[in-house]
Amino acid sequence: MRVVIAEDLVLLRDGLVRMMNAYGFEVVKAVADADGLYETLCAVRPDVAVVDVRLPPTFTDEGLRAAAAIRARWPQVGVLVLSQYAELGLATRLLADGVEGLGYLLKDRVAEVEEFVDAVRRVAEGGSALDPTVVSQMLSRRQADEDLGRLTPREHLVLEAMAQGLANRAIADRLHVSVRAVEKHVTNIFDKLGLVVGAHGDRRVLAVLRFLRR
């Protein structure tokens, strides 16, 4: 699995390279800015790009704009965006058009090596990986939503885990319940959000977007 890294901090960039290599990834390039990222993508086609949300020269939203450009030009490339802080506005912009093949994690998660590596793989394979802190804040913002307000506390936990890209088995392990119990919660979530089978896309994705969007 091939990865390109765009991170301006040398120590973090080098650390990511060593980590990816140690876990069997092929780092095709590690660059410090968006221009280097674009040049790399034009030359080679990685499976996933790990991108700092704030890159030179302005350190505002270059990484976010790079992620959008990658999605538009190379939709088969997964994008995992790293941020120093939980910035809900930037996260919502990133996820506005769907969560498939996208991730948004706080840089602190890099220290949780196995979970971070799993997130990179999941995004590369077309899944999603959202930071629990960001998901929790997004979910809290939307408690006033009438449909979401009908969910039980356990269903909220299941929906939060779904938003982080976890499959039913992983959710069951996290909540210490059976897979069958998780499946029942997921069905209840779909019903309470009015998501019927075959209605305009994958119900799991639609349920996540229901509270991720403003």
Image (cartoon, rainbow, N blue to C red):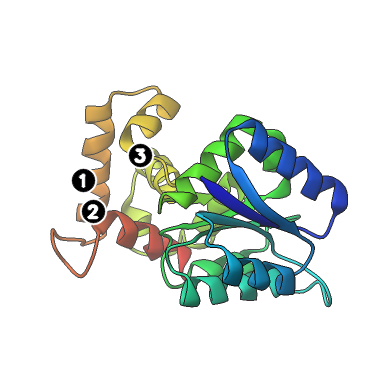
Q: CA distance from mark 3 to mark 2?
A: 15 Å
Judge from the rendering whether residue 46 lies leftward or rightward of residue 107; answer left or right: left
Residue at 72% x, 43% y: name it. 17
Give 47 or 190, whichever is nearer the viewer: 47
Kindly indicate the quadrant of the structure image that contains residue 62. Answer: bottom right
- Residue at 23% across, 37% down: 183
**Residue 17 seen in render:** yes
x, y percent for residue 57? 84, 76
Q: Residue furthest left?
A: 197
Q: Amino acid at mark 3?
A: Ala
Q: Are marks 2 and 1 in contact (CB under 8 Å)?
A: yes
Q: Residues within 10 Å of mark 2 (few under 14, many from 20)?
A: some
| Proximity of marks 1 and 3: CB atoms separated by less than 8 Å | no
Q: Is residue 29 left or right of residue 103?
A: right
Residue carrying label 1:
187
Which of the numbered marks, if any, corresponds to residue 19? Answer: none
Kindly identify which residue carries mark 2.
190
Task: Tell me how far mark 2 sits from mark 1, CA to CA.
Answer: 5 Å
Mark 1 and mark 3 lie on one chain; the one further toward the N terminus is 3
Q: In the image, what residue type sits under mark 1?
A: Thr
Give the label, 1 or 3, closer to the camera: 3
Q: Please tell me whether mark 1 sits on a helix, a strand or a loop.
A: helix
* Res 214 seen here: no
**176 shown above or below 200:** above
Which residue is labeled 3 in the image? Answer: 167
- Cα separation, mark 1 vs mark 3, equals 14 Å
Q: Earlier in the sequence, mark 3 or mark 2?
A: 3
Determine which quarter of the picture holds residue 209: bottom left
Q: Left or right of 84: which side holds 124?
A: left
Amino acid type for the residue under numbered disc 2: Phe
